[in-house]
């Protein structure tokens, strides 16, 4: 079975996880809160397709160990969806290092908030040749009057589209002109 690792999958990416399970992935979901994890697990059918990795990703050793165990149990990871806050700047590299240890090809979808600098994020990472890096930048939607941030459903669908299209750079909504972002005018 294909194995996907979703970091921070129990919030705005929940519906994306449900869709990936329907596509036949075994999901290893990493987050801290067990209640949110169980609520996601109930939406995934059959529930055996999801493994809970209850870990704080700011704890580097625990993050490494959890990913290593998930790979030992469910096989190499071919898809990573990474939504990691800036409180854990080292975590994306830790994830890449652990996932690449198997030597198998994988795609790494790095989800970034609207105000992030995607070039700086990519340049800070060291990827092996079998790792394919994809940026997904979250934006906003312009409306008749003003603009609004994306809903969780739109974020999940957008990330799903990004995975399907498999382009190096994908924007969900818009980020230009930046002056038109919600709350700025
Ligand atoms: N348009 C944009 O640019 C944009 C960008 C970002 C966010 N947003 C919006 O802002 C809202 C808030 O963002 P959010 O990040 O709270 O979104 P979220 O996706 O709802 O929650 C964050 C996810 O990461 C996990 N997480 C957080 N800290 C963690 C840690 N230290 N270790 C392991 N897992 C951790 C959370 O689970 P646990 O809490 O269980 O650990 C959860 O699964 C979102 O709901 C979204 O609508 C918009």
Image (cartoon, rainbow, N blue to C red):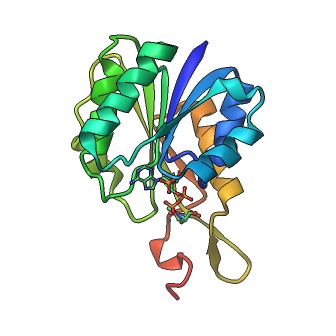
Locate residue 96: give its quadrant: top left
Residue that sits furthest to the front in the current view: 34
Estimate the x, y position of residue 146 in percent, counting from the top left.
65, 82
Residue 168 or residue 16, whichever sits in front: 16
Q: Is residue 157 visible?
A: no
**Number of numbered discs present?**
0
Q: Taking 155 as reference, is 70 left or right? A: left
Q: Taking 13 as reference, is 62 left or right? A: left
Q: Residue at x 56, y 48 (%)?
A: 34
Q: Is residue 115 visible?
A: yes
Estimate the x, y position of residue 75 in percent, counting from the top left.
48, 13
Locate residue 11: give its quadrant: bottom right
Q: Is residue 141 above or below residue 82?
A: below
Q: Is residue 29 above or below residue 36?
A: above
Q: Residue at x 53, y 77 (%)?
A: 180
Estimate the x, y position of residue 13 in percent, counting from the top left.
60, 48
Q: Residue at x 54, y 61 (%)?
A: 139
Q: Residue at x 26, y 41 (%)?
A: 60
Estimate the x, y position of residue 44 in percent, counting from the top left.
74, 35
Q: Is residue 23 above or below residue 73?
A: below
Q: Quadrant of the N terminus?
A: top right
Residue 14 or residue 33, whichever sits in front: 33
């Amino acid at each position: 079975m294909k194995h996907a690792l979703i970091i921070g999958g129990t919030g705005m990416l929940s519906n994306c996880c449900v869709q990936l399970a329907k596509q036949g992935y075994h999901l290893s979901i990493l987050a801290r809160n067990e209640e949110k994890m169980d609520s996601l697990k109930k939406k995934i059918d059959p529930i055996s397709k999801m493994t809970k990795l209850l870990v704080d990703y700011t704890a580097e050793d625990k993050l490494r160990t959890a990913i290593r165990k998930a790979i030992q149990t469910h096989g190499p990871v071919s898809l990573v969806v990474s939504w990691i806050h800036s409180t854990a700047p080292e975590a994306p590299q830790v994830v890449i290092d652990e996932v690449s240890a198997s030597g198998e090809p994988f795609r790494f979808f790095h989800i970034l908030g609207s105000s992030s600098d995607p070039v700086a994020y990519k340049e800070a990472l060291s990827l092996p040749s079998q790792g394919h890096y994809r940026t997904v930048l979250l934006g906003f939607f312009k409306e008749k009057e003003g603009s609004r941030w994306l809903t969780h459903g739109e974020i999940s669908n957008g990330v799903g589209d990004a995975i399907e299209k498999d382009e190096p750079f994908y924007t969900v909504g818009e980020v230009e002109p930046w002056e038109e972002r919600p709350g700025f005018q």
